[in-house]
Amino acid sequence: MDEQEKQEEQCQTSIDIARAFEMSIFLMMLGKIRKVLSDGSKRAKATALHEIRKYVKEETKAFLKQEKEAVRHDLMLVGESAYDNLDKRSKKQIKCNTFVSSYAKDTDDYFKKYMKTSGNNYILDKNTNIYQFFNNFIEQNVKDVVDGKVPIEKEISDAVDKLAQNGLKIVDYASGRTRSVEVFVRQQMLYASKESVQDLRIANAKKDGITIWEFDAHPNARPSHQEWQGKRYDTTGKYYPKLNDLTNGEEKDFGCKHRAYPVYNKDDPYMFTKEQLENINTEPFEWNGKTYDGYEATQKMRAQERTIRDYKKRIKMKKEQGVDTTNDEFLLKKHNVEYTSFCKTFGTYRRSNRLKIS
């Protein structure tokens, strides 16, 4: 288990709250969809939409309050681990308790800043927020249900499939980027914790007049990141390229695992030899008639994990609504078998924490 995976497990409380928040919103919407489809009146639709807006507002407030408490708890766990990974010179300049407190505060500041800019506009895809989805779904299906052409269970099942497939997403208005609530929490906490540790390293390096830094390396990195992992940069540009000239800012990407470490003597050997870097990736392998390199395999795993979570959500929501789940349970089992097979062929293990929905 690498450092990021360990941190992700330590952030599980915050991630679980995000998952529960999404499920709560979806179950409430499904209840209102059923009620309006059964009634068929415009008044019922208007009342339901008002109640959904009110519920979303209240749940968002509760979500932010719960997350604030969970973040403090989870980040203290992450902070203690991060301190253990600091270089010896940094440890000499700051005590563990002081660092952990500072680390948690810095990361919490990052998190709160992002939450403020995210707003309260939750969407299902790039063009449809949850209120538009409700309106559109009712408009498209209410007549067929009222006229008896389509069973209400069929329409509820379709609504569940659409909600599960898209997931509840949050918009970052500054960048226009959309992420699911769960991914939003996971990525922001991991990114912020990484930046906080790096800020500490930079502050300590400046005290010592250090200008040279070296990136670590890990298997199956994003192809463009493989170009600069294991290499050095110099903040002055005297001995090595400057940071942005080396990475083009890619070290700031969400999900980037790379860390930079201070180099106290430019004649010190690199952490990784040229041969180690050339052979760091998993050898290409074939699975189910297709060849994957290491990076493609990690992306395949993430896609399989999302699919498994989607089917678990479908089953949970449909059972809550009394809708048949036989086909969904069959497909969930199928996807689980495929995921296990792929992980085994890839030479890795199932990420159980990424398969949970609550």
Image (cartoon, rainbow, N blue to C red):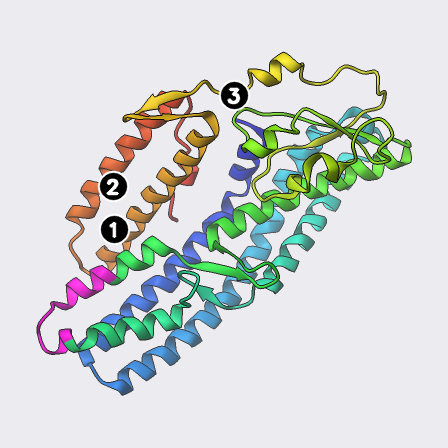
Q: CA distance from mark 2 to mark 3?
A: 31 Å
The answer to whether residue 358 is above or below residue 154 is above
Q: Nearer the viewer, mark 1 or mark 3?
A: 3
Q: Identify the residue at image location x=30%, y=73%.
A: 136
Q: Amino acid at mark 3?
A: Asn
**Dot label at residue 315:** 1
Q: Is 49 contained in the magenta span?
A: no
The answer to whether residue 320 is above or below residue 292 is below
Nearest to N terminus: mark 2 or mark 3: 3
Nearest to N terminus: mark 1 or mark 3: 3
Residue 23 coordinates in the image, percent (x, y): 37, 58
Q: Identify the residue at image location x=54%, y=24%.
A: 219
- Residue under pointer 2: 332
Q: Are marks 2 and 3 in contact (CB under 8 Å)?
A: no
Q: Identify the residue at image location x=58%, y=25%.
A: 218
Label 3: few (<14), some or many (≥20) within 10 Å? some
Q: Are marks 2 and 1 in contact (CB under 8 Å)?
A: yes
In the foreground, 119 or 83: 119
SS for dot 2: helix
Instruction: Look at the image and give the residue range highlighted in magenta.
Output: 144-158
Q: Amino acid at mark 2?
A: Leu
Q: Residue furthest top?
A: 275
In the foreground, 189 or 154: 154
Q: Residue furthest bottom?
A: 43
Q: Identify the residue at image location x=11%, y=68%.
A: 150
Residue 225 coordinates in the image, percent (x, y): 60, 33
Q: Nearer the viewer, mark 2 or mark 3?
A: 3
Residue 148 lies left or right of residue 191; in this view the side is left
SS for dot 1: helix
Nearest to N terminus: mark 2 or mark 1: 1
Residue 175 coordinates in the image, percent (x, y): 59, 58
